[in-house]
Structure formats: C-alpha cells, structure tokens
Image (tube, rainbow, N blue to C red):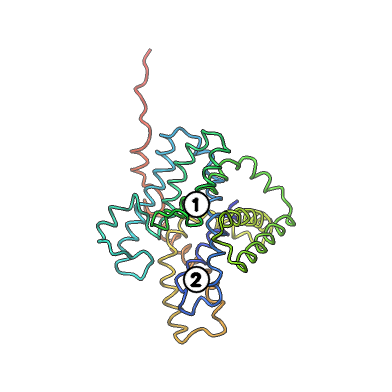
Amino acid sequence: MDAAKAIAIIMVVFLHTVFNHAGSGVSGHWGQFVGLLDTFRLPLFFFTAGLFAGRAIRLPLVDLLRTRISHLAWVYALWSIVAVVAVLVLPLTGATDRPAVFSLLLIPVIPTPATWFIWALIVHFVVAWFAVRIPAPVALGVAAAVSVVFGTGLLATGYIEIDKTLYNLIFFLLAVQTSTRLRPMIASVSIWWAAVAVAAFAAAAALVAKFALLEVVGVRLALGVLAVAAGCLAARAMSGLRVFAWMSVLGRNTLPIYLLHWYVLLVVYAVVNLAFADGAGALTDLLAPVMTAVTIAGCLAVHRVTRWIPGVYARPAWLVRVLEPRKGPARTR
C-alpha cells in the first residue's frame, strides 16, 4: 500500500500549495475544489497509516509507548519547536497572538498546523490500543459518531487541528480493525473495480458540490469512505504498472516530505512570484500541480542530504537506549 501513501502525500502537498495561494490569483480554478479534495486526502492519509499500525497496536501498552509513541513524540516535539520558531520569521501558517514561550509550552496539547498530523497519530495510536480491546462494532460506532459530530461542526474544540484529529479517527480505526482481511482483498481486486471506485467518488463529489451537501450530517463521512476505497484501489492498480514504480519509493518517504514541505514550498513560492510577478495568465491552472511536483522533489533532495543527522527524522540512538527494557540480573544455579 505504499502507492496509496504516495497518493495521500501528493494530495497533502497539493492542497497546501493551493491553500497558500487561495485568493491570490495563483491557485487558478483549484481553489473552489479545496473542500472536496480535503475529503479525499485526510481520510486516505489516516487510513493508510492505520493499515500499518495493527502489529504495534497489539503490543502491551508499555511497549507501544516505548517504541512507536516515543518515535512519534520525538519527531513531533522537535519539528513543532522548529515550526513555532520559524513562524516568527517566515510567512508560514500558524501565526498566533500568543507569546512564543506559551506556544512552546502548549505543544503537547495544542498541535501546530505544520505538525498536527504527527500529533493526531499519537492520539490515534493510543485510542486504538484501547479500541481493539473492546468489540469492534462498539469502537467503530463511537468513532463514526464522533466523526459525524466534528465533521459537520455540531461540536468544535476551537482548534481545527484537534477537530480534524477527532473527525479522522474513524478512518484510522477502520484500517486497524480490517487490515488483516482488507489488504489481501485489495491485492486481488482488478483494475476495473479501481475505475469503478474512482468514478463513484468523482460522481459523489460532483453531486455534493452541485447541491452544497458537504456540511449535511453524514455526507463528509460517506465521501471519506468512498475516497478511501478509490484511493486504495487506484493505488493497487497503479502499483502494477512500471510507469508508476516511483510511487512506492514516494510512499516509503512520506514522513520527511510531510515535515519538510512547508519550508520547501516557501522557496518554490519565492521563485514563482519572481517568475510570474504580473500573473501566470493561461498557465495559472498548471502552477499548483507543477509546484507540487517540484516541492516533493525538493523535499526528497533535502532529506537525502540531511537524513544522516541523528534525531532529525527518528529517535536518536541515546533515546532508544534509554527506553530499552532493563534486563533483570541473570539467575545463578
């Protein structure tokens, strides 16, 4: 399912490219589809994360915290500090009226826009650990209700990143609960079913857009489920074609792309603004896709140069050693 992860990260970067240009004339006609495209990228992103979480979720809680959660917590804390400091000097999303020291102290409970997905994964892993130990229909039913309530704005925390974490929990749990059965099924599905799933999502999205149904109770969740089916089946079909072999590589590098893309985008924006100071004219609608491709390539290049630095993209060795379970004294006969 690396290709599905690749589709998800491409959509994340693409949407952030359009978000940052919304209203500036650079996003072209893409801006009007932001809401619908958002129903595709996040459900697929969290679902693919859940597909690979089953083994970790079934560890004893202390082992889950010691391994997967400590890795995510380290990456989240480090890059959140970077984001809080960077927003003071760079035109990044996430500027607040709070003093920087308060923002730093609030990192554990209020995620930054640049790193909230990592925070959400920590929450999802912990919730899923408990969820798999109760009947699946109960866990999924509660998660679906939470998704509907926060997805339609019936309840809100005041922080969109927390609301999105709660809304997308259902997709992570659904993947965890069904991964052992679902992954073989996806692998055996023909390309025609992939085409049907993509067409179904496109038709549903067009219907929702035409009649402004996105905020109707349950519609966003239903569209998200269709997006997951379309994304996973399309990824399966694409992974069988040699021309899309690069997507598997991309899918295995989603973390560094996610962490770096905000900063690489700034450089891409600067170049675009210099090259098209008076507007891109007929090329406007091509800018966002091209900028997305260039940004992802830039992220991979930066990662290639910096991946040797300890602790940047994973726990440093000293933390791994500290968290290793202590072995008791050897028994003597």
Q: Position of residue 99 (x, y in %)?
A: 25, 61
Disc marking residue 18:
2
Q: Position of residue 64 (x, y in %)?
A: 44, 38
Going by the numbered disc 1, the residue's amino acid type is Val
**Relative depth, front residue between 50 and 128:** 128
Q: Residues within 10 Å of mark 2 (few under 14, many from 20)?
A: many
Q: Position of residue 326 (x, y in %)?
A: 35, 30
**Relative depth, front residue between 169 and 190:** 169
Circle 1 or circle 2, nearest the eye: 1
> Could you tell me which residue is drawn at 53 percent across and 38 percent down?
55
The answer to whether marks 1 and 2 mark residues whose Cβ atoms lie closer than 8 Å is: no
Q: Earlier in the sequence, mark 1 or mark 2?
A: 2
> Could you tell me which residue is drawn at 36 percent across and 15 percent down?
332
Q: In the image, 218: left or right of 314?
A: right
Element class at badge 1:
helix
In the picture, residue 281 is in which quadrant?
bottom right
Element class at badge 2:
helix
- Is 323 situated above or below 104? above
> Could you tell me which residue is drawn at 44 percent across and 50 percent down?
120
**Relative depth, front residue between 168 and 181:** 168
Going by the numbered disc 2, the residue's amino acid type is Val
Q: Residues within 10 Å of mark 1 (few under 14, many from 20)?
A: some
Disc marking residue 149:
1
**Relative depth, front residue between 189 and 158:** 158
- Is 316 situated above or below 7? above
Task: Look at the image and tell me in which quarter the C terminus lies.
Answer: top left
